[in-house]
Image: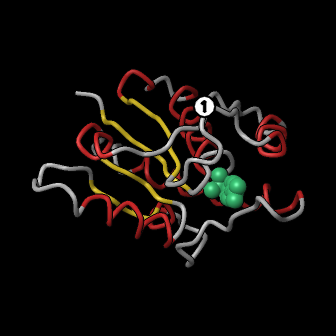
Amino acid sequence: MKKRVLFVCLGNICRSPAAEGVFLHLIQSRGIEAHFEVDSAGTGNWHVGKKADSRMINAAKKRGISLPSFARQITLDDLYRFDVILTMDSANLAAVKTLALEIDSEKIAEIKPILSYARSSNSLEVPDPYYGGDDGFEIVLDLLEDACKGFLAEFS
Ligand code: 4NP
């Protein structure tokens, strides 16, 4: 059975598409992509239908990582469909947990901060790079590469 993983941030144009791309790159390079279903979503709806932010796309491209996603907003159905939902910061975590309160079932996704799997960071917050400079996108990718490797290590 495939492990279904959803990455969630606020706008679904910077952090969660990057997490999706980083994780896809990792599983493809290890030849294990058939074991996973991977997607990303935002808690907000402002950017629905858009490709990832060009600054995020370019920073990822320099690392050989492509970001295939188009922004969408998380739905209640995602909580049933995915096994695990990995959030980027405490606001996303709270928003997804609030959504989960609408469901009267225990058979829903496990909801966790992605940085709970990071090995080189004690923080649970992937900083939002949207209003900052280029270095913010590099910091996001460094954190996500570390956390995605830590998450994948759960399956080996
Ligand atoms: P993301 O970044 O949550 O990592 O996609 C953001 C993108 C856009 C906005 C905020 C955060 N915004 O306010 O439009």
Q: Residue furthest right?
A: 133
Query: Going by the image, does 59 lie left or right of 80?
Result: right
Question: Can residue 142 be seen at all in this image of the molecule?
Answer: no
Quadrant of the picture in which ligand 1 is shown: bottom right
Q: Neighbour class for label 1 at 10 Å: few (<14), some, many (≥20)?
A: many
Quarter-of-image position of residue 32: top left
Return the residue nearer the eye: 127 or 115: 127
Which residue is labeled 1 in the image?
69
Residue in the image at 81% along x and 63% along y = 131
Total numbered labels placed on residues in the image: 1
Q: Residue furthest left?
A: 105
Quarter-of-image position of residue 55: top right
Quarter-of-image position of residue 20: top right
Inspect the image, locate mark 1, and give the three-letter code of the amino acid beneath it: Ser
Return the residue nearer the eye: 117 or 134: 134
| Residue 93 pos. (x, y %) | 43, 66
| Residue 155 pos. (x, y %) | 34, 44
| Residue 40 pos. (x, y %) | 50, 41
Return the residue nearer the eye: 141 or 39: 39
